[in-house]
Image: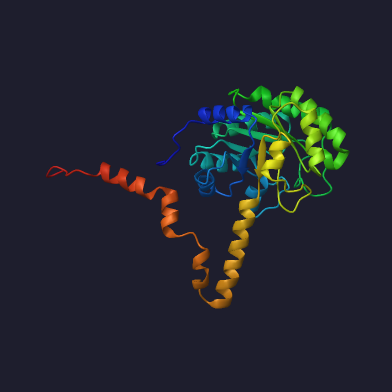
């Protein structure tokens, strides 16, 4: 994997669609940067996720709609360059009115992604597992979805609709919203902040498109394992912020150790080694490429 991936965005989109069509549960961790996306692939997962909450946190911002479409498109392009896995991105509310959502779809298509999800919160939005959320009227979200569908150029680019209505209007209303979004052209549904396995089952019974289970830590949803989710008929197990939380916890512990000990010596067993990092980055491939390019002698005087 020298400089770029070995596959095209179109190939990755088709692969994502084919994986979803099998009915098999896909495991999708959230990357915190492009290098972690490479590690997700190297560890054998099925797809990569780019969380709006993670990108906002990476910029030192809360997840309340402060990031822009161009910022997430830039991170998306950096990520899709380094992994052959399909990448799904959190596009928040589409960054404005249906016309903005339409432009966002095309920006993110151009960034090489396999798909995105749009949500039905008002803008500015908030984390889906916090109280006090507000959702737009169902008809407004339907317009948002239709705008995205109309703007899509590659029919394999997955358009997923997220509904936050469970915590606001209750489960039956959330299910009715999901059905309306599918009728408007959504390819898949992301039901946010479901309370238990019975609610997962109710969604699966009511909605006949791929469903995503959001397994974020410290939230309203139980951390169901992959066997339980597969038995419930779900298609994607999402771990959106897990890697960020692990990394930041390790960074914080490491800083405290250095501050207390005056050296990082005690931290060495917990670090990724230089050799493993170089293996992940493909140093050997770059070195081989470079030596091949320069393996010649210039004629005198040139």
- Left or right of 298 in this view: 179: right
Task: Determine if residue 58 is in view.
Answer: no
Left or right: 141 with respect to 286? right
Q: Residue at x 83, y 49 (%)?
A: 131
Q: Quadrant of residue 238?
A: top right
Residue 38 horizontal/vertical position (percent)? 50, 45
Q: Is residue 131 visible?
A: yes
The quarter of the picture where residue 168 lies is top right
**Image position, residue 154 (x, y; %):** 58, 24
Quadrant of the image containing the C terminus:
top left
Relative to 71, is 205 above or below? above
**Is 229 in front, or is 1?**
229
Q: Residue furthest left?
A: 300
User: Residue at coordinates 55% horizontally, 31% vertically from top-left?
Assistant: 110
* Residue 206 at x, y percent in the picture: 80, 28
State whether residue 228 is above or below residue 182: below
Q: Quadrant of the N terminus?
A: top left
At a point 64% along the width and 56% down the height, the residue shown is 245
* Image location of residue 189, percent across then percent down: 72, 32
Q: Who is closer to the viewer here, 255 or 84?
A: 84
């Amino acid at each position: 994997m020298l400089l770029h991936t070995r596959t095209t965005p179109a190939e990755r989109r088709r692969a994502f669609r084919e994986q979803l069509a099998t009915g098999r549960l896909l495991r999708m961790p959230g990357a915190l940067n492009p290098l972690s996306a490479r590690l997700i692939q190297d560890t054998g997962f099925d797809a990569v996720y780019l969380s709006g909450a993670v990108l906002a946190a990476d910029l030192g911002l809360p997840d309340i709609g402060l990031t822009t479409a161009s910022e997430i498109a830039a991170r998306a392009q950096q990520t899709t360059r380094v992994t052959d896995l399909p990448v799904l991105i959190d596009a928040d509310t589409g960054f404005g009115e249906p016309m903005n959502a339409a432009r966002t779809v095309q920006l993110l298509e151009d960034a090489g992604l396999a798909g995105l999800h749009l949500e039905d919160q008002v803008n500015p939005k908030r984390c889906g597992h916090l109280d006090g959320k507000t959702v737009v009227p169902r008809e407004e979200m339907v317009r948002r979805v239709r705008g995205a569908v109309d703007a899509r150029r590659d029919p394999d680019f997955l358009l997923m609709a997220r509904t936050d209505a469970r915590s606001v209007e209750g489960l039956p209303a959330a299910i009715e919203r999901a059905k309306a979004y599918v009728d408007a052209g959504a390819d898949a549904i992301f039901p946010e902040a479901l309370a238990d396995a019975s609610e997962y089952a109710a969604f699966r019974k009511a909605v006949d498109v791929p469903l995503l289970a959001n397994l974020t830590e410290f939230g309203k949803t139980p951390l169901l394992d992959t066997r339980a989710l597969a038995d419930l008929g779900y298609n994607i197990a999402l771990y959106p912020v897990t890697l960020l939380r692990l990394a930041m916890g390790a960074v914080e512990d490491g800083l405290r150790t250095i501050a207390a000990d005056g050296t990082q010596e005690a931290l060495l067993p917990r670090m990724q080694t230089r050799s493993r990092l170089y293996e992940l980055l493909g140093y050997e491939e770059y070195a081989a490429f470079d030596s091949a390019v320069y393996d010649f002698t210039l004629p005198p005087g040139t």
